[in-house]
Amino acid sequence: MFWTLPTIMTWARIVAIPLIVGVFYLPLSEPMRNLIATVMFVVFAATDWLDGFLARKLNQTSAFGAFLDPVADKFLVCASLLVLVHLNRTDVFVALIIIGREIAISALREWMAQIGAGKSVAVHMVGKVKTTVQMVAIPFLLFNGMLFGTIDTGAWGQWLIWISAVLTVWSMVYYLQKAIPEIRARAK
């Protein structure tokens, strides 16, 4: 199941990363670069929902797809955050919180799966809310202008990315609390 439609869509999110970054090096006006990068991010981020839906609908779920999907999501978010830090549109502290949490929780989930306790750190609602807020904040910050002449996406993006950072810490604490019994049991 390496080249199914859902898996190809997941690969597209990874391929999108240098394309989104590259937009900011094109000889275009800043508003045009912002718009192109925003549209690309939104389209590729939407494939996260679509590939999962299609995998289930077409009965094309696979262990490889289940592995690649969150990796692609994390690459897309982390690369976008680094671009935003480079453009001075978000604080490096926010990026460190979000990227650090992604690394820590991914490692925790891998370890918990190895010891047969992966279900205790399965995705929880606070993690889903965190992801949703991130997926709104990032395109707002990429766009960094007035949307429909009334919404200051830069200001809203700043608020949302900080809310996302708080939710990121909250979700990390939640997952660590779920894992502590296993960590303690193996530390003896």
Image (spheres, rainbow, N blue to C red):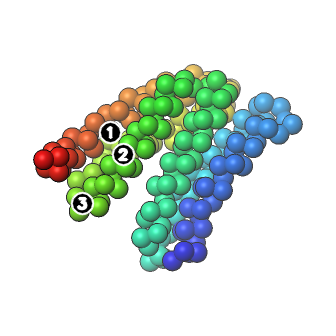
How far separated are the C-alphas under marks 1 and 3? Answer: 21 Å
| Residue 169 vs residue 105, the one in the foreground | 105
Q: What percent of the width, then of the height, locates residue 137?
A: 53, 34
State if disc 2 and disc 1 touch (CB < 8 Å).
Answer: yes
Q: Which of the 4 quarters of the picture holds residue 119?
A: bottom left
Q: Residue at x 66, y 41 (%)?
A: 38
Q: What percent of the width, then of the height, locates residue 155?
A: 57, 22
What amino acid type is highlighted by mark number 3?
A: Ile
**Viewer-nearest of discs 1 and 3:** 3
Residue lying furthest front: 188
Q: Residue at x 23, y 53 (%)?
A: 120
- Report the side of 181 relative to 11 (left or right): left
Query: On the image, numbered disc 1 is attached to which residue?
Result: 171
In this orientation, does residue 61 appear? no
Q: Is residue 178 above or below residue 115?
A: above
What amino acid type is highlighted by mark number 2?
A: Ile
Q: Earlier in the sequence, mark 1 or mark 2?
A: 2
